[in-house]
Each structure stands twice: as structure tokens, then as C-alpha cells.
Amino acid sequence: MERPPVSSPVLLLPGLWDSGPTHWQSLWEARFATFVRVRQRDWVTPRAGNWIEVLDLAVERAGPEALLVAHSLGCTLVARWAGETRRRIRGALLVAPSDVEAPSYPPGPQGFAPMPTARLPFRSIVVASEDDPYVALDRARAFAAAWGSDLVNAGRLGHLNSASGLGMWPLGMALLQRLGGGPAPEPADARYAEGT
């Protein structure tokens, strides 16, 4: 396998329904041995408490240098977990944080609402799209402000998932490198950065 772009262990946190084979999270997992998907028990009707428990165990194994890379409901998971744990991590990349209070949010998940708004005790970057069907950009901006996160506007890329056609998603990788403290070349998309 290829040498990872960061020295920290990376935990990949998919959202509702998991991340399919062409999702950038799956492509990252396949390419780098130190990128590990946190496998939840129920991807369709998840309970927040169960997901938090699984994440906490994964962070315990990965250690305090871990970086979390969350997508969609995984972002809400990270914010809820942060309010309940004493474990430390290096940082979190929070991509397309679904608004679990919005009418557009799919039924199934239990215990994730309301959206957590406490400041995160670690460095974080929120990446949002201008046309995400599961979170309005203004709401994503409000979440980033509440969490103390930098915000990056990725443009019009939908839910930043498989349907967005991101491939290995170089912008996301560059932002992860920034969180990890390594050299992060400024990608062209970084012109959308609002809080970095």
C-alpha cells in the first residue's frame, strides 16, 4: 500500500447507509493501510448511543494522535461523542454535516437530534457544499461557528458523496494534511475557504 499522507492514524466515519465503493472515504481506505473505517452495527436505523460507543472504542485503540474523517451523519456523531468522552484526538475533518433537524433528513436515525452545538475540544474543519440537499450552507456555517471549526465552501458539489464524482478528492486530502500538521499544498478549491 501507498505511504499515507499523514503520520496519524485516521478513522473514517461514514454517515447513514455507510459509504459505497466509489465514495472518497472508501477510496482512501483502500489506498492507505492506516486509514480505518469505523464499522457501525446498524447503518439504516442507527441509535446515537450505539454509534458513540463504537467510536469511543475505536479512538481508544487508535490513540490521542488519531484524526477523524467524518461524512454526513458521521459529523453529528463526532460532535455528540466529543460532548461525552474524555478521550483526546488530534483533529477532525467534518464533511457535509447533515442537518438532522431539517425536513429533508431521511427517517431512521434515533437520538442524533437536536444538532449538537457545543464547541469541539480539538481542531476541526467543516467542508460544505452550496447545493447539499441535506444541509443548507447557512446551517453548515452555523455549525462550524458553534463547533469552533474552520469552514471550507466546496462549491456546488451536492452531498460530497459518491454521486458528486470526487474520486480521491484532492481537496479533502489537502485539508486532512493541514489538520495533521504536514505539508498541505493549497489546492485550487481552497479559494472557497472562509475560516482558514
Image: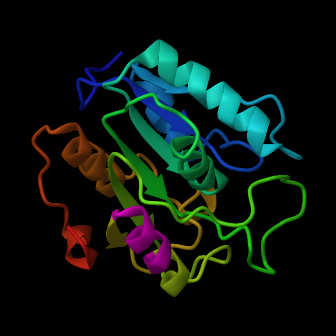
- Residue 77 horizontal/vertical position (percent): 62, 47
- Residue 45 horizontal/vertical position (percent): 89, 46
Residue in the image at 58% along x and 83% along y: 136
Is residue 30 left or right of 88 when viewed as pictured? right
Q: Please state which of residues 159 and 151 is positioned toward the viewer in this rendering.
A: 151
When asked about the image quadrant of residue 66, the answer is top left
- Residue 133 horizontal/vertical position (percent): 67, 78
Residue in the image at 55% along x and 46% along y: 83
The colour mode here is: rainbow
In the depicted structure, whether residue 115 falls above or below residue 153 = above
Asked whether residue 109 appears in the rendered view, the answer is yes
- Residue 119 horizontal/vertical position (percent): 42, 59
Q: Please state which of residues 8 and 1 is positioned toward the viewer in this rendering.
A: 8
Q: How many marks?
A: 0
Q: Main secondary structure of the magenta part?
A: helix
* Quadrant holding the N terminus: top left
When asked about the image quadrant of residue 52, the answer is top right
Q: Please state which of residues 119 and 94 is positioned toward the viewer in this rendering.
A: 119
* Quadrant holding the C terminus: bottom left
In the depicted structure, whether residue 75 falls above or below residue 3 = below
Is residue 95 left or right of 170 when viewed as pictured? right
Residue in the image at 80% along x and 53% along y: 111
Q: Which residues are magenta?
A: 141-149
Asked whether residue 38 appears in the rendered view, the answer is no
Q: Is residue 143 magenta?
A: yes
When asked about the image quadrant of residue 42, the answer is top right
Q: Is residue 47 magenta?
A: no
Is residue 135 left or right of 67 when viewed as pictured? right
